[in-house]
Image (cartoon, rainbow, N blue to C red):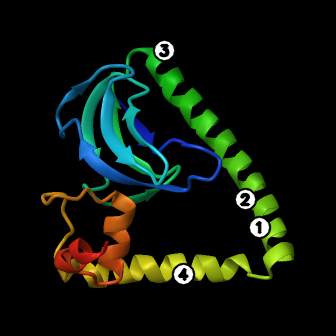
Amino acid sequence: MAKFELKLPKMGESVAEATLTTWLKEVGDTIELDEPVVEIATDKVDSEVPSEVEGTLIEKRYEVDDVIQVGEIIAIIETEGGDNAEENTAEESDTTASAESKENEKEESTTTENTDSLSGDPVPDALKDVEKTVEKGTETAAVQAITNDGERFYSPLVRNIAQQENISQDELDQVE
């Protein structure tokens, strides 16, 4: 039995992360080739992530409302080990992901240089902000989650910001 790592695919040039909105499959479910496994939302688009192999979902790495970076492993799918075609598909996917990752690094370094020279804001500060946000995320777990049960719809981005800033559902509902 071979294991395939389902990764969050590149969604666009400027999209670096996505929020997991719904698991469409549970651990132990059989997954067909190109069958959607999970739904995600970015600040630009909502999408499904399809499986690149046939197999059985054996591990979920994230929960609903978790923020995931592009290229991160979101699930593990166990495939039949006897079929070389499936193993090759998994290897090709990893190779493609590696190539995309290298392209992302090149684009990011070019973007970093341009940002530094134009605005004077060093990117390491932005990375520190992201790290603080991740650390703060664990502290804000006690804050009640923002839901879409009321009259207004809040995107995952708005809900995450509200949670990070300790803004309650009532306060958010009062914003006009």
Q: Position of residue 91 (x, y in %)?
A: 55, 30
27 sits to left or right of 2: left
The numbered mark, 4 or 3, whose residue comes first in the sequence reads 3
Q: Tell me the distance, in whole angstroms, between the alpha carbons under discs 4 and 3.
A: 43 Å
For label 4, the residue is: 129
For label 3, the residue is: 85
37 sits to left or right of 101: left
For label 2, the residue is: 108
Q: Tell me the distance, in whole angstroms, between the alpha carbons under discs 1 and 3.
A: 40 Å
For label 1, the residue is: 112
Q: Tell me the distance, in whole angstroms, between the alpha carbons under discs 4 and 2.
A: 17 Å
Looking at the rendered image, the disc whose residue lies closer to the viewer, 2 or 3, is 2
Helix, strand or loop under label 3 = helix
Q: Nearer the viewer, residue 145 or 56?
A: 145
The numbered mark, 4 or 1, whose residue comes first in the sequence reads 1
Q: Tell me the distance, in whole angstroms, between the alpha carbons under discs 4 and 1.
A: 15 Å
The numbered mark, 4 or 2, whose residue comes first in the sequence reads 2
- Crowding around mark 2 (Cα neighbors within 10 Å: few <14, some 14 to 19, many 20+) is some
Q: Tell me the distance, in whole angstroms, between the alpha carbons under discs 2 and 3.
A: 34 Å
Q: Nearer the viewer, residue 128 or 147?
A: 147
Give, as a three-letter code, the residue at label 2: Glu
Q: Quadrant of the rendered structure where residue 77 is?
A: top left
Q: Which mark is residue 124?
A: none
Q: Position of residue 33 (x, y in %)?
A: 37, 19
- Quadrant of the image containing the C terminus: bottom left
Q: Tell me the distance, in whole angstroms, between the alpha carbons under discs 1 and 2.
A: 6 Å
The correct choice, above or below, for 148 with respect to 29 in the image is below
Helix, strand or loop under label 1 = helix
Residue drawn where x is 58% and y is 27% of the image: 92
- Whether label 1 touches label 2, CB < 8 Å: yes
38 sits to left or right of 103: left
